[in-house]
Amino acid sequence: MLARYAQYGGIEAGGTKFVCAIGDASLSLLERIEFPTTTPAETIGRAIEFFRSRAGNDGLTALGIGSFGPVDPRPGSPTWGYITTTPKEGWQHTDFAGSLRRALDVPVGFDTDTNAAALGEGALGAAKGLHTFAYLTIGTGIGGGALVGGVRIHGLLHPEMGHMRLPRAEGDKFEGVCPFHGDCFEGMASGPALRARAGGPPDRLPADHQIWTNMVHYLSAALVNIACVLSPQRIILGGGVMHQRHLFPRIRRRVQHLLADYLQSPEIVNHPETFIVPPGLGDDAGVIGALALARHAAGGDIDQE
Ligand code: ZN
């Protein structure tokens, strides 16, 4: 049962910044704050302070966390709610969700930042009304989350779409920046990879530069793989790199070309602008998804909505 006055807390925890918000039962944002990700003690402490000071006398009904990872999202696991093997300095094996649950004494929903963003887009954004879709963020890292049949994907751990292996673009000599794999998807096409390729901020590159052609190559190859594996009704592309809107039409054409009319769906063949889309919630997808995780933790069956 959801009380009418339910008040949810949400954290979108990124490697660069934290976004904390308080929202109501319809997931409208009532309060929102951002601060840089520093040490775990300082950053988690600021989040706790925000919720304690802003949630009022009744406090939060529940808290949701969408976190950078890898994380342990398995209920019942001794390390549930931990950030695990992250390359982010100082954050390895951090008891993230448990620290907040103890400090705020509320139910906590915990998942990857991208599963949370997918949940947010499904509740209020570009995937509203769909049951099977994927959300990718192309930014400081590359991550992907998905709902299949209305349920977030969890298995042994969680999807790591950013680390799939992709064929190299012809003539591309870039080594890749992933500390684990070098030239995986994230290694070749994340924001840091793009900056390294461009030798600085990529904004000044002309739209027809070869670097963009290579980016389109990797993004399209990844989307084809996701389309073939999950059969999503839609794929949402968010994150800082996708603020380069000129990439969208090129990616759609390239995905069509690579699929070569093999997947016979009107969304792909005739209306790719409905198949590969930007987030409906813009850069708020993650934090609204975190509020949806909180609602779910409190007993609202958000995955089925
Ligand atoms: Zn990798």
Image (cartoon, grey):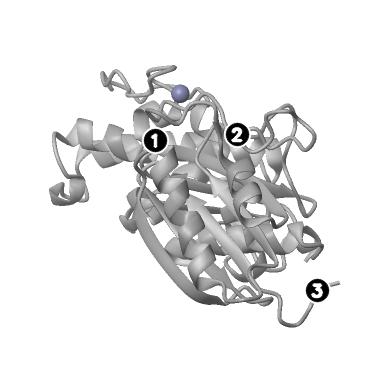
Amino acid type assigned to the residue bearing label 1 in the image? His
Q: Which residue is more in the foreground, 87 or 94?
A: 94
In the picture, the quarter occupied by the N terminus is bottom right
| Distance from mark 1 CB to nearest ligand 1 atom below 8 Å | no
Q: CA distance from mark 2 to mark 3?
A: 28 Å
- N-terminal label among 3 and 1: 3
Q: CA distance from mark 1 to mark 2?
A: 34 Å
Q: Which mark is residue 82?
A: 2
Q: Left of 305 or right of it: where is 135?
A: left
> Residue 56's spot in the image, x, y percent?
57, 76
Q: CA distance from mark 3 to mark 1?
A: 46 Å
> Please, what secondary structure does the residue beneath circle 1 have?
helix
Amino acid type assigned to the residue bearing label 3 in the image? Leu
Q: Dot 1: few (<14), some (14–19), or many (≥20) neighbours within 10 Å?
A: many
Rendered view: 54 above or below 223 = below
Residue designated by label 1? 217
Determine the residue positioned at 55% across, 42% down: 144
> Please, what secondary structure does the residue beneath circle 2 have?
strand
Q: Which residue is more in the foreground, 213 or 92?
A: 92
In the picture, the quarter occupied by the C terminus is bottom right
Residue farthest to the right?
1
